[in-house]
Image (cartoon, rainbow, N blue to C red):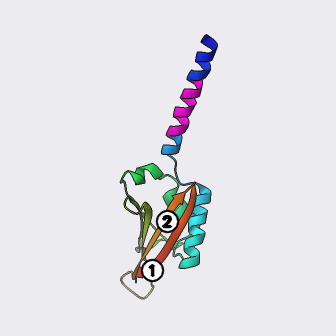
């Protein structure tokens, strides 16, 4: 009897633990790679895969679904300049869609300002896969 209780307790512990892990799941490499490739096919992305990975890898999917938004200032250029780019991700509860907003501030040598372009990306996650991907230049 004691032996069975031990296994039942152990099973419940791991069931609860695995439930918690899935709730706090971050974007994984294959999701980020798929997202980057799908975005790049629709509109040439102004950022590298590494920038997207660095932005998304520590974001918990469940936090987005609970209404949190994440924003980060990044640099798309491979040299230091004053033109800072911004990536922001959120989740639209109505459409159950993740929204990735990219504000690109391009460096142009002869200008004293940074021309800006805005991209909007959207996608869903079904069975751990990225689906229904859209990525478009909306202003610039």
Tell me if residue 106 can be seen. Answer: no
- Classed neighbour count for the residue bearing mark 2: other residues with Cα under 10 Å, few (<14), some (14–19), many (≥20): many
Give the x, y percent position of residue 31. Answer: 58, 59
Mark 1 element type: strand
Q: Earlier in the sequence, mark 1 or mark 2?
A: 2
Q: Residue at x 35, y 54 (%)?
A: 67
Residue placed farthest to the top in the image?
1
Q: Is residue 105 above or below residue 32?
A: below
Looking at the rendered structure, which numbered label has been put on residue 137? 1
Residue 45 in magenta stretch? no
Tell me if residue 114 can be seen. Answer: yes
Residue 13 in magenta stretch? yes
The residue nearer to you, when weighing 44 against 81, is 44
Q: Residue at x 36, y 84 (%)?
A: 112
- Classed neighbour count for the residue bearing mark 1: other residues with Cα under 10 Å, few (<14), some (14–19), many (≥20): some
* C-alpha gap between disc 1 and disc 2: 15 Å
Q: Residue 2 falls in which quadrant of the image?
A: top right
The magenta stretch spans which residues? 10-20
The residue nearer to you, when weighing 41 against 3, is 3
Mark 2 element type: strand
Give the x, y percent position of residue 61. Answer: 47, 52
The residue wearing badge 2 is: 123
């Amino acid at each position: 009897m004691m032996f069975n209780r031990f296994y039942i307790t152990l099973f419940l512990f791991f069931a609860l633990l695995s439930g918690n892990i899935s709730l706090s799941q971050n974007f994984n490499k294959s999701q980020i790679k798929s997202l980057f490739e799908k975005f790049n096919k629709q509109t040439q992305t102004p950022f590298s895969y590494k920038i997207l990975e660095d932005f998304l890898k520590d974001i918990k999917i469940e936090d987005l679904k609970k209404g949190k938004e994440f924003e980060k200032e990044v640099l798309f250029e491979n040299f230091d300049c004053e033109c800072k780019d911004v990536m922001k991700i959120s989740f639209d509860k109505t459409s159950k869609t993740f929204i990735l907003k990219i504000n690109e501030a391009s460096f142009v040598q002869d200008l004293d300002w940074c021309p800006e372009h805005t991209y909007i990306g959207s996608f869903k996650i079904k069975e751990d896969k990225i689906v229904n991907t859209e990525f478009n230049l909306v202003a610039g």
